[in-house]
Amino acid sequence: MIPELCFRRASQESEPSHTLSLPSLYIIAQGSKVAALAGESFQIDPGTYMVASVHLPAIGKITHASPQIPYLSLQLTLTPDVILDISKKSSPGKRGETGRGIIVNPSTPPLLDAVLRLVHLLDTPSDIEILAPLFIREIFYRVLQGEQGELIRPFAVIGSYAQGISNAIHMINRDYSKPLVIEELAKKVSMSPRSLHKHFKRVTAMSPIQYQKMIRLQTARRLLLTEGLDAATAGFRVGYESPSQFNREYARLFGRPPMKDIHHLRGSLLDP
């Protein structure tokens, strides 16, 4: 078992799914998928790979899959310490340009070769402890050498705007149910409110307030589905003071009022 590595298989195309994209490398071996971030779409297929540098509330949809040709993908968790160490050795540390938190690049033979070697380690578990860290390091080295590698490096560089935004995202995810005061958040990440807003939007395609709203609504949906809460309780749990505002914003994001949405979700999970 390689803790950083996970796989997904699907035999049919999917409905749009709201997820919190983890900082990871995503590679599709077969089929294709579209990821949407605040209305911006990213197409991923076997000729490309995607990197999410921070936690992002994205919408994913598998667009090509069938029982005969199933969708197959893998996800490799991004490790900031590895990125930082590689960056120090291959490029001097600098603040860098802040870019979108999701990038899609063409795959390269050296990158895919390193990924295959990592996957093949699952056949020889005794080799994983020694070789997996080396192969993972090589994989992210290849990613950093890619067309948009310079947009990934700053997320691991201490003092960069990108790392400041990464820290801000972590704080919002940790305290999503609490009121968000931009001036306080900016101070915690050593940025001015104006700079925080500008760079946050570059990375996530949304403002900090919009980001928090997405996290709150996605969390509420999960609570409704898994804990059987009523809509008002779920709304209060994630930080809403007004049930009507919660219902309105929930329906705007997911297309249905809370309880109708959960009923629809449960029905779709029961479908063969």
Image (cartoon, rainbow, N blue to C red):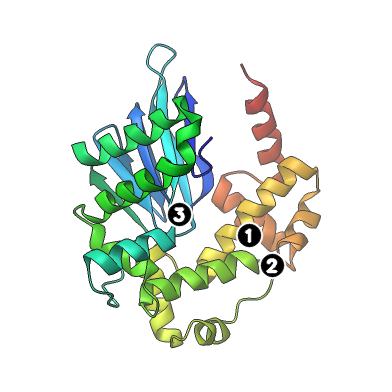
Q: Quickly name the residue at label 2.
A: 177
x and y percentages locating residue 213 in the rendered image: 58, 63
Q: Nearer the viewer, residue 26 or 235?
A: 26
What is the C-alpha distance between the residues marked 2 and 3?
22 Å
Amino acid type at image mark 3: Pro
Give the residue displayed 26% in from the left and 56% down from the top: 144
Q: Which mark is residue 67?
A: none
- Identify the secondary structure beneath mark 3: loop
- For residue 107, say whether it is visible: no
Tell me the quadrant of the picture where the N terminus can be found. Answer: top right
Q: Mark 3 or mark 1, which is nearer the start of the sequence? A: 3
What is the C-alpha distance between the residues marked 1 and 3?
19 Å
x and y percentages locating residue 244 in the rendered image: 72, 60
Q: Quickly name the residue at label 3.
A: 23
Question: Looking at this rendering, what residue extends furthest in the top direction?
Answer: 68
112 relative position to 102: left or right:
left
Amino acid type at image mark 1: Arg
Q: Mark 1 or mark 2, which is nearer the start of the sequence? A: 2
- Identify the secondary structure beneath mark 1: helix
- For residue 245, say whether it is visible: yes
Q: Which mark is residue 216?
A: 1
Amino acid type at image mark 2: Ser
Vertically, is 177 above or below 48?
below
Tag 1 near tag 3, CB within 8 Å: no
x and y percentages locating residue 123 in the rendered image: 45, 24
